Amino acid sequence: MCLTVRRTTDRSPRMLDELASGELTLPIERYGLDGLAEAVERLRTGEAVGKVALDLS
């Protein structure tokens, strides 16, 4: 088995450009305080896709 190791910094400028242009998006699940239990459960079970954010407003 052959593994290729690349430093993440090598791709950082390209990834930042793609994020800025909207070509690359990052999934974020957003929950209000009333959804806190669901958010925690999804994190605990590994079902959450991407990041989970709580809206405290």
Image (cartoon, grey):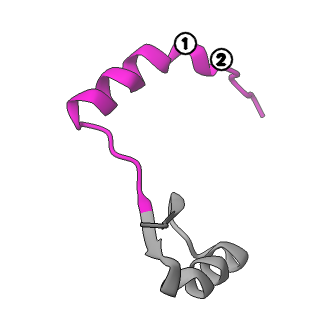
Q: Are marks 1 and 2 in contact (CB under 8 Å)?
A: yes
| Label tally | 2
Q: Could you classify mark 1 by the number of other residues whose Cα lies within 10 Å: few (under 14), some (14-19), or many (20 or more)?
A: few
Locate residue 42: give its quadrant.
Answer: bottom right
Measure the C-alpha gap from mark 1 to mark 2: 6 Å
**First to last magenta residue range:** 1-28
Tell me: residue 17, above or below residue 26: above
The residue lying toward the viewer, choosing from 24 and 54, is 54
Q: Position of residue 46 (x, y in %)?
A: 66, 73
Secondary structure category for the residue under label 2: loop
Which quadrant of the structure image shows residue 32?
Answer: bottom left
**Relative depth, front residue between 56 and 54:** 56
Q: Who's the residue at 51% across and 62% down the image?
A: 53
Q: Quadrant of residue 18?
A: top left
Give the structural element (helix, strand or loop) at label 1: helix
Residue occupying the far right of the picture = 1
Residue 7, label in figure: 2
- The amino acid type, in three-letter code, at marker 1 is Asp
- Is 8 above or below relative to 41? above
Does residue 40 belong to the magenta stretch?
Answer: no
Q: Is residue 24 covered in magenta? A: yes
The numbered disc on residue 36 is none
Q: Residues within 10 Å of mark 2 (few under 14, many from 20)?
A: few
Q: Amino acid at mark 2?
A: Arg
Residue 10, numbered label? 1
Quadrant assignment for the N terminus:
top right
Residue at point 42%, 66% (across, down) = 57
Residue under the image location 39 percent in, 23 percent down = 16
